[in-house]
Amino acid sequence: MAEKPHLNLVVIGHVDHGKSTLVGRLLLDTGQFPAHLLEKFKEEAKAKGKESFALAWIFDQLKEERERGLTIDVAHKRFDTDKYYFTIIDAPGHRDFVKNMITGTSQADAAILVVAAPDGVMAQTKEHAFLAKTLGVDQMVVAINKMDEVGYSKEKFEEVKAEVDKLLKSIGYKDDQLQYVPVSAFNGDNVKEKGKLDWWDGPTVLEAVNNFKVPEKPVDKPLRWPIQDVYSITGVGTVPVGKVETGVMKPGMKLIFLPSKKPGGVVGEVKTIEMHHEQIQQAMPGDNIGANIRGVAKNDIRRGDVAGPVDNPPTVAKSFIARIIVLNHPTAITKGYTPVFHCHTAQVACRFEELLKKFNPRTGEVIEENPQFLKTGDAALVKIVPTRPMVIEPVSEFPQLGRFAVRDMGQTVAAGVCVEVEKA
C-alpha cells in the first residue's frame, strides 16, 4: 500500500492545560498505544496519587518527567488517521523548555492549541500562539479542553472560544486557518466519539486534524540543501548528508556549497543519491539524504553549509533584517549583543547591529522607533551582522532557511524570521 501523506503536528498551549493528556488520548484512541500498558500506568499513577496523569505518562516516558509531572523534552510520536499519518511534536509548556517548542514548531505543518475551559487564555497561550504564527504554522485546531470540569457547558465553550478567537485574530490568523473543538481529553469526549458532548455538531478532534491540508512541497523552488554532516567513505568519496528543504536534486547536477571553507564556495557534481541505504533517482523536499559529490573534499565543507544550484546559489549574508520576539532574557538586549543564532543546520554568533523598531507583539503596530533595549516579551525589527559567513534567506522566499532561534547562556532568548538579506 502507498504511504499516506505525512504531516508534522505540534501540540502547544499553557502548562497544565492538558497537552500530554490529549496526545496520550489520541494515541490510545487511534490504537497506537496498547490498552494493557495504560492499565499498568493507571495502577502506577494511582499508587503515586497522580491518577489524572496516567494518559500523559503514555507520552512522557522519561522518568524525571513522571516524577515532576511536567513535559520536558520534545517527544516524537506517530499516529494515523484514515487519511494521514502524523508525527506529533509535543512541545513543552514550561518557560525553560521554549527552545524545544521552537525547534519543534519550526518543522510543524499544523498545530493543536490546547486551552483549558476553566482557565481560558493564559500567558503561555499567547506566547505559544504568537510563536506558532512567527514560525510559519498557518493551520490550527484549537482544542478547548477539560470540558468535563465545566459540566460540558456549551456557554462556557462559546465564551472561551470567543476569547481565544480574539487573541488569534489579533496575531493575524484568519477564520479559514482555524477550527475550534470542545474536548475532554481525560475522559475522551469528542476525541474520537462525541461522548457527553452531544450538543456539539462540529468535528471531533480526529476529524478536525483530518481537515488539515498537506503543504505543497516546494519542488518548483531552487534546490536548498543544508548540510548536517560530511562523511568521507572509502571507495566512494565525499558524502554530505542533510534534509532537502526546497527544490529537487538529481544525479549529474552541479551544486555550489556556501559559505564553505573556501572563499566563494566550492562546486561539485552529484554522482549518486541515497536515502535509507537505497539509491534514489531524485531527492524531494523533506527527504533526508546522503549524496556522493565529485570534486569536493571532505574538508572543504562543514555542517551549516547549504548547497544549491550554481546558477541560483544560496544567499550568504553580510547582514540581515529580522523580525524577532524576545522569549526569555534575564536583563535586556542592546546594540552589540552577540549570541548564537541557530538557523537550519548552522550555528553562528551574530551581532545585534541596530534595534530598528519595537512592535506590539499582539497587533504588530510600531510602539517605538530605534529603541535603546529589548526585554522579555518584546517584538522587534532588528539588523543583524553574522561574525562569520552564514547562509540565511528571506522567509518570504525560503521559509525553511529564514527562521532561527537565538541562544545564549544555555537557553533560547529569542526566535525570529529573516525579512531581507544584504548579500556578502
Image (cartoon, rainbow, N blue to C red):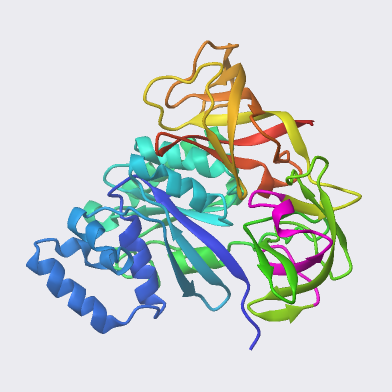
Residue plotted at (52% across, 10% down): 372
Residue plotted at (60% across, 11% down): 370
Of residue 162 and residue 31, the one placed in the foreground of this image is: 31
Q: Main secondary structure of the magenta part?
A: loop
Q: Magenta span covers which residues?
A: 281-305
- Residue 344 visible in the snapshot: yes
304 magenta-colored: yes
Residue plotted at (55% across, 55% down): 108
121 magenta-colored: no
Looking at the picture, does residue 356 appear above or below residue 159? above
- Residue 163 visible in the snapshot: no
Tell me the quarter of the picture where residue 247 sits: bottom right
- Label total for image: 0
Side of 367 relative to 392 (left or right): left
The location of residue 294, given as percent across then percent down, is 83, 65
The location of residue 169, given as percent across then percent down, is 54, 37
The location of residue 91, given as percent across then percent down, is 41, 53
The location of residue 89, given as percent across then percent down, is 46, 59
Specify the farthest residue to the right. Answer: 311
Side of 226 relative to 267 (left or right): left
Side of 304 relative to 72 (left or right): right
Quarter of the picture containing the C terminus is top right
Tell me the quarter of the picture where residue 371 sits: top right
Of residue 100 and residue 424, the one placed in the foreground of this image is: 424
